[in-house]
């Protein structure tokens, strides 16, 4: 059998190989086409509903997104707890365990990074959020922290701190929640000490171009109701944002999930 196969291969010509590659390509493209068509057929009603939603409501304004956060705040932990276990919680562990020294967290929410920070080498902690309802929730958790901790009401786009104030600046689902994420990232870099750490966990469009294209083509991202429900957008181009930020040195980016979760290790120049 093996001998026979060797015999065949020995007589292969370049046009046999080209023919093989062409046949495989046609088969793969046709399979993708059939899958995509059947997907759109199966979810036609849902897609139509989403299209009508977008046409009627568009994207939420900053005030409407803040309203969503105020609404979610009292039972935010209960609501997202199960959803985030094994996903966001695991990613937070991976990226924020390296936080050290005096730490600033931007868009702290209800303080979902505390379980990681408590075990890290944090000496002092300041959390910032613009939403009072979220701050009410996180304040309840401050006395249990093993480090000196306080929270401040402020916008991540205009941080009330001097340049180079913190050893580590972190953000978890932070840039995707800001109206102007580029400004927010600039601010994080500004208040970080030179060579200090900027650690981020974000969601956005998929890391790989092909996955990005697929998700857009299937109408998975952006989901028009996502921002209304959860306050943060799901179609931020994280890599573009990192690249455009002056003074930020990106050491490592790891994509997780379907490539829509970004774990970022960076530092201020
Ligand atoms: C998706 S939640 C994430 C909360 C938390 N970091 C976490 O990982 O669970 C986004 C948070 O961003 C806050 N936020 C939205 N716009 C903000 C702004 N301009 N400045 C500061 N915080 C903001 C919201 O109030 C909310 O608490």
Image (cartoon, helix red, strand yellow):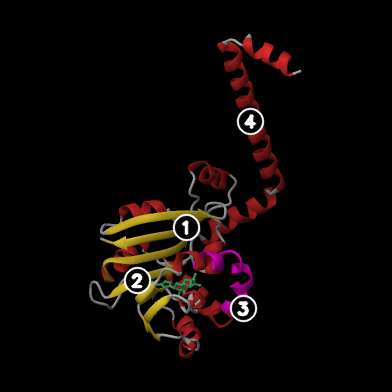
Badge 4 marks a residue whose secondary structure is helix
Which percent across, then down, holds residue 248? 30, 59
Q: Which residue is mark 3?
A: 78
Contact (CB < 8 A) between labels 3 and 4? Answer: no
Which percent across, then down, holds residue 225? 57, 62
Does label 4 or label 2 sit earlier along the sequence? 4
Q: CA distance from mark 3 to mark 2?
A: 28 Å
Residue 26 shown left or right of residue 209 in the figure: right
Q: Which residue is mark 2?
A: 168
Q: Residue furthest front?
A: 3
Membership of 89 in magenta stretch = yes
Does label 3 or label 2 sit earlier along the sequence? 3
Q: Is mark 2 within 8 Å of ligand 1?
A: no
Q: CA distance from mark 1 to mark 2?
A: 18 Å
Q: Which residue is mark 1?
A: 262
Chain part drawn in magenta: 76-92
């Amino acid at each position: 059998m093996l001998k026979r196969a060797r015999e065949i291969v020995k007589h292969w010509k370049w046009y046999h190989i080209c023919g093989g590659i062409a046949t495989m390509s046609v088969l793969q493209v046709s399979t993708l086409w059939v899958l995509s068509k059947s997907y759109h057929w199966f979810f036609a009603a849902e897609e139509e509903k989403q299209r009508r939603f977008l046409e009627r409501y568009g994207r939420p304004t900053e005030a409407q997104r803040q309203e969503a956060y105020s609404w979610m705040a009292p039972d935010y932990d209960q609501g997202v707890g199960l959803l985030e276990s094994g996903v966001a919680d695991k990613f937070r562990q991976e990226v924020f365990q390296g936080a050290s020294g005096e730490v600033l967290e931007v868009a702290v929410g209800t303080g979902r990074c505390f379980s990681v920070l408590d075990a890290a080498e944090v000496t002092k902690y300041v959390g910032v959020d613009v939403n009072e309802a979220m701050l009410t929730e996180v304040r309840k958790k401050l006395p249990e922290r093993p480090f000196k901790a306080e929270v401040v009401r402020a916008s991540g786009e205009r941080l009330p701190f001097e340049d180079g104030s913190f050893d580590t600046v972190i953000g978890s689902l932070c840039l995707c929640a800001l109206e102007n994420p580029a400004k927010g990232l600039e601010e994080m870099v500004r208040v970080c000490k030179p060579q200090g750490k900027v650690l981020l966990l974000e969601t956005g469009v998929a890391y790989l171009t092909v996955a990005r294209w697929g998700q857009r083509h299937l109408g998975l991202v952006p989901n028009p109701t996502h921002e209304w429900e959860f306050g943060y957008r799901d179609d931020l181009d994280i890599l573009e944002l990192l690249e455009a930020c002056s003074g930020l040195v990106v050491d490592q980016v790891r994509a997780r999930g379907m490539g829509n979760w970004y774990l970022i290790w960076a530092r201020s120049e």
